[in-house]
Amino acid sequence: MSITVKGVIDRKGFGAGTWAIDSEQGETYEIHNPPSELQKKGLKVKIEGKIRDDIMTLAMIGPVLEVKKFEIAK
């Protein structure tokens, strides 16, 4: 399923840690293999991507979002 998520990047401290986006709607999505540009806590972004139902993670903080493209908010 393809979605667009607007929100703020956060580093969640579970295990080795994982990058996530906390959406404006209150949902948290774990970012699958985030590009280095998205690995900045507090960054406001819009991410277009795909929910990966075929991936399980150790963090289990929410749906896994594979980034197709993104914009950093000005």
Image: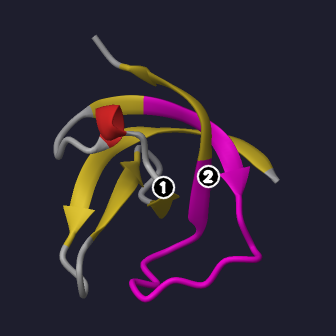
Say which element carries label 2: strand
Residue 5, position as x, y percentages in the image:
54, 40
Label at residue 66: 2
Q: Which residue is mark 1?
A: 33
Residue 30 shown left or right of residue 11 in the figure? right
Residue 65, position as x, y percentages in the image:
59, 56
> What residue is drawn where x is 76% and y is 77%?
54
Q: Does the CB distance between marks 1 and 2 fall below 8 Å?
A: yes
Q: Amino acid at mark 2?
A: Glu
Q: Is residue 58 in the magenta section?
A: yes
Q: Quadrant of the C terminus?
A: top left
Q: Is residue 5 above or below residue 21?
A: above
The one of 39 and 22 positioned closer to us in this rendering: 39
Q: Earlier in the sequence, mark 1 or mark 2?
A: 1
Label at residue 73: none
Residue 72 shown left or right of residue 17 in the figure? right
The quadrant where residue 36 appears: top left
> What residue is drawn where x is 17% and y is 46%?
41
Q: Is residue 59 above or below residue 71?
A: below
Question: What span is colored magenta in the figure?
Answer: 46-66
Say which element carries label 1: loop
